[in-house]
Amino acid sequence: ALPNQTLSLAAMSSTGASLKWFRDELCQAELESSRKAGKDVYEWINALAEDANPRNDIIFLPYMMGERSPLWDPDARGMFFGLSLGTKRGDLIRSIMEGAAYALRHNLEIMERSGERASILRILGGTSRSRLWNQIKADVLNREIEVMETSGGAPLGNAILAGMALGWYADPSVVLERSECHTKRVVPADGRHHFYHQKYEIFLELYEQTKGQFKKMSSIFSRGEGTV
C-alpha cells in the first residue's frame, strides 16, 4: 500500500474468539449477573485467571476455527491438554491466554527465521485491555512489548490510505505524528520464560501429533457419517 514498503502478515483465526467462546458457553451465570449489574464479565474472567496457578499443567490449542498462519489447516481444532480433577476454570482461562501467546510466538519465530526482525512489538485491540494477557505475551515471547492504550487501529490506517488516494496528503507519517497514541511498556517477569518455553515445545508437538486425527475427524463429517 505504501511505496517501497512491504508487510509481513500473520493472521490467526480465533485467539480472542476462543476466550469469547469460553465466556458464552461456560460462564452463562456470570455473564447474566454481570449484565444485570452493568459490569464487564471479562473483569471477573481476568480475576479468575489471575488467581490461577501460573505454573499449571494445562495447554490449549487455539484452533477453534481451523488455523491460518502459520498452519494453514482448516481441519485443526481447539484442544485442552492436561485436564485433571483438580483443574479449575481459572486454569482453563489462563491456558487460553497462554495458547494464544504460544501461537503468536510460533508466527514470530517463522518471520524471524526468514530474516525479519521486529524492533518493537506493539499490541492493541480488545485483548490488550487484559493486564494479565499482556504480561503472559511478554513472558512467552521473552520480549518487552508496548501496549497501545489509545489507537485507531486498522480503521485509522484505512482512513489514512484513503486520504492518500484522494491526494489530501502524500506522507502518512504526518497524520500519525498528529494522532494521539499512548503506550505503556510490559517487561518479561523474572523466571517465567523458561517454564513457558518448555510448555511451548509441547504446544508445537501437540499439533504435529494430532493433525492427522483432525483430518480423519473432518473426513467423517464431510462424508455425512457424523450423525447417529
Image (cartoon, helix red, strand yellow):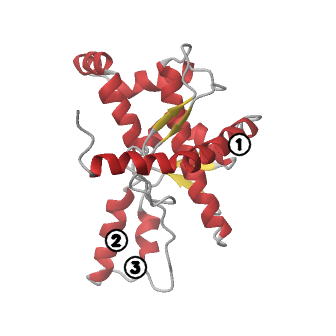
Of mark 2 and mark 3, the one earlier in the sequence is 3
Residue positioned 31% across, 22% down in the render: 39
Residue positioned 58% across, 29% down in the render: 58
Distance from disc 1 to disc 3, alpha carbons, whole Å, reads 36 Å
- Residue 123 at x, y = what percent? 51, 50
Judge depth for marks 2 and 3 and give the one in front. Answer: 3
Between 167 and 137, the residue placed more toward the observer is 137
Which quarter of the figure has residue 55?
A: top right
Vertical comparison of 158 with 16: above or below: below
Between 7 and 113, the residue placed more toward the observer is 113
Residue positioned 42% across, 75% down in the render: 172
Proximity of marks 2 and 1: CB atoms separated by less than 8 Å:
no
Distance from disc 2 to disc 1, alpha carbons, whole Å, reads 39 Å
**Which residue type carries mark 3?**
Ala
Of mark 2 and mark 1, the one earlier in the sequence is 2
Residue on which the image places disc 3: 1
Crowd class of label 3 (few under 14; some 14 to 19; many from 20; radius 10 Å): few
- Residue 70 at x, y = what percent? 51, 60
In the image, taking residue 169 as reference, residue 206 lies left or right, namely: right
Q: Residue 8 got which mark?
A: none
Tell me, yes or no, if residue 28 can be seen here. Answer: yes
Distance from disc 2 to disc 3, alpha carbons, whole Å, reads 11 Å
User: In the structure shown, which secondary structural element does the residue marked by tag 2 occupy?
Assistant: helix
Residue on which the image places disc 1: 197
**Which residue type carries mark 1?**
His
- Residue 186 at x, y = what percent? 62, 42
